[in-house]
Image (cartoon, rainbow, N blue to C red):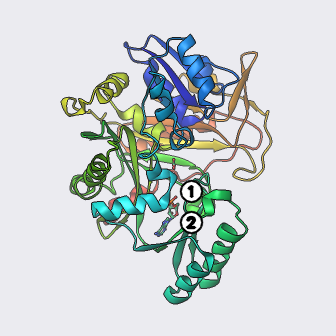
Amino acid sequence: MKILVLGGGGREHTICYVLSKSAKLEKLFCTPGNGGISEIADIVEGISVTDFDSVARFCKENKIDLVFPGPEEPLVKGLRDFLEKEGIKVFGPDSVGALIEGSKSFAKEIMDKAGVPTAKFEVFDEPSKAKAYIEKKGAPIVVKADGLCAGKGVFVCETKEEAIKAIEKIMEEKIFGESGNKVVIEEKLVGEEASYIVITDGYNFKALPTSQDHKRLLDNDEGPNTGGMGAYSPTPLIDLELRQKIEKKIIAPVLKTLEKEGHPYLGFLYAGLMIVNKEPYVLEFNCRLGDPEAQVILPRVENDFLEIIETALEGNLDKVELKERKEAAVCVVMASKGYPGKYEKGKKIEGLEKVSQIQDVIVFHAGTKKVNNEFYTNGGRVLGVTALDKDIPSAIEKAYKAVSLIHFEGAHYRKDIGKRVFKYLGSF
Ligand code: AMP
Ligand code: GLY
């Protein structure tokens, strides 16, 4: 199979890494890619992942069998609808399925129809009505811009004033543009967050290993939200009983509802969950793999990854057994100084060759660039250092040992990735 991966972050490096291990892979291309991806795939220059005409032209010229998008944006904008008309396969949902991430009100509507547990909510398209609702409901309360906002559209508000300000920013100042035409206002849930991602052919699904992201910039979950500063898998937060509950109450009914609406969902369905007293509630859905969750989930899948993707494309996912490696995985993200705000690029990265000697450590590149055989920083999140070991504590130790060998000016990373498990193991 000849595959074109779209994207250039740590998640896409991980996708390329597991695809490149498959005997079924004939040729791998990636756009825009990054320094690490350039070692295992041919980088395609000059194509934007949302320029579907150029993507289609490249696919035809290079006889690409499958396009594999990493991020949500091309899917929400209709990548699959467009390429399928051109006879090119895409591993991801059509533009209606992708609305599960692209529109929070659509996701809530589907959850309503499917009877999925989620925070109680209302949708508004007029700021005055949204504000009146906040006045009536009081705080704490959560305000969400309806459309895609690069992970910045959610305001968890502790006071009414904060919530009213959020409405003004989203609906009046339009800081997210059209994505703020509508808002979802919902009750605040208090619990523990986890990510539950399944791979599905629209009718059958297989759960990938469980994981937990660390969204805040600083240790002890302090500081601003980021794309994710690290992850680990599996999480003891989700035991077998909870897995079954999540699949029965959330995943299966959502897939059934999308199928009934005429849009069977192909690809990854990511449920961002809040676990409240051992009961799962959906905070959000994503139509893709998580980043950095992919960096701990995919290396823990024992199967040939491309074989699973092919089986899903054929609609035969019920025929495979997804095998999880026993080893746990921890990924520590190393970021540029200043991220998630402004940061400098072009810092030389040193120590990668030392880390390549350690067994079961994989350095997934995100914002990096390779110049004359040297790697330089080229983004906010720079590297995701993943370690596998017999259990989470050993994987934590191994990941941090690897991180200590890598240097670039201003490197920032959290020191407590994975350590939440100790809290859960105490209480579960
Ligand atoms: P979302 O993009 O909808 O997952 O929201 C981003 C983050 O906001 C989540 O990871 C949670 O930390 C927080 N959040 C979203 N919805 C709620 C809610 N209803 N209650 C509490 N926190 C929430
Ligand atoms: N790590 C969170 C996400 O990918 O949405």
Outermost bottom residue = 136
426 relative position to 82: left or right: left
Q: Residue at x 56, y 31 (%)?
A: 364
Mark 2 packing: few (<14 Cα in 10 Å), some, or many (20+)?
A: many
Looking at the picture, tell me which residue is in the foreground, 86 or 315: 86
Question: Which secondary structure lies at badge 1?
Answer: loop
**What residue is pinned by disc 1?**
147
Dots 2 and 1: beta carbons under 8 Å? yes
139 relative position to 210: left or right: right
Q: Quadrant of residue 276?
A: bottom left
Q: Residue at x 61, y 64 (%)?
A: 181
Question: Which secondary structure lies at badge 2?
Answer: loop
Q: Earlier in the sequence, mark 2 or mark 1?
A: 1
Looking at the picture, tell me which residue is in the foreground, 290 or 31: 31
Q: Quadrant of residue 262?
A: top left
User: Where's the C terminus, which quadrant?
Assistant: bottom left
In this view, 135 is above or below 22: below
In this view, 80 is above or below 116: above
Q: Residue at x 72, y 44 (%)?
A: 336
132 relative position to 255: left or right: right
Q: Quadrant of residue 357?
A: top right
User: Where's the N terminus, which quadrant?
Assistant: top left
Amino acid at dot 2 = Lys
Q: Residue at x 55, y 38 (%)?
A: 74
